[in-house]
Amino acid sequence: MGEPGTAVLIVRLGRNGVVRHLRVARSTRDQALMTAAEGTLKSASPYPPFPPGVKAHRIKLRVIFLYD
């Protein structure tokens, strides 16, 4: 891959661990890095479901990818 960079993505997960929404909060100049970051989050879905005691219907996470 190209030069070092940072990508920040916002991901919303539903109770069942499925990615409901994904958006880029901060992009790198290297499209290959952005594609890799987005693909990593999408391909790991579904994540584990929320524990039984959690009442939230969805959560929002900020995920930071640092490339050296």
Image (cartoon, helix red, strand yellow):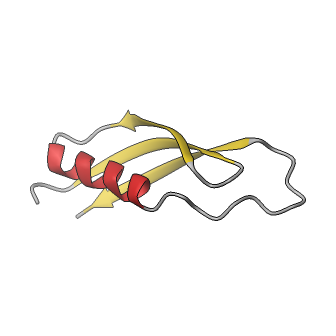
Q: Which residue is drawn at 54% across and 58% down?
A: 46
Residue 19 lies, in percent from the top left, at: 53, 46
Counting labels gives 0
Q: Residue at x 26, y 55 (%)?
A: 36
Residue 44 lies, in percent from the top left, at: 45, 62
Q: Quadrant of residue 14?
A: top right
Q: Nearer the viewer, residue 53 or 65?
A: 53
Residue 20 lies, in percent from the top left, at: 55, 39
User: Which image quarter is the C terminus in?
Assistant: bottom left
Q: Residue at x 76, y 41 (%)?
A: 57
User: Which image quarter is the N terminus in?
Assistant: bottom left
Residue 2 lies, in percent from the top left, at: 9, 56
Q: In which quarter of the image is residue 8?
A: top left
31 relative to 6 in the view: left or right: left
Q: In which quarter of the image is residue 4?
A: bottom left
**Depicted 53 relative to depicted 19: above or below:** below
**Depicted 49 relative to depicted 7: above or below:** below
Q: Nearer the viewer, residue 52 or 12?
A: 52
Residue furthest to the left: 2
23 relative to 19 in the view: left or right: left
54 relative to 2 in the view: left or right: right
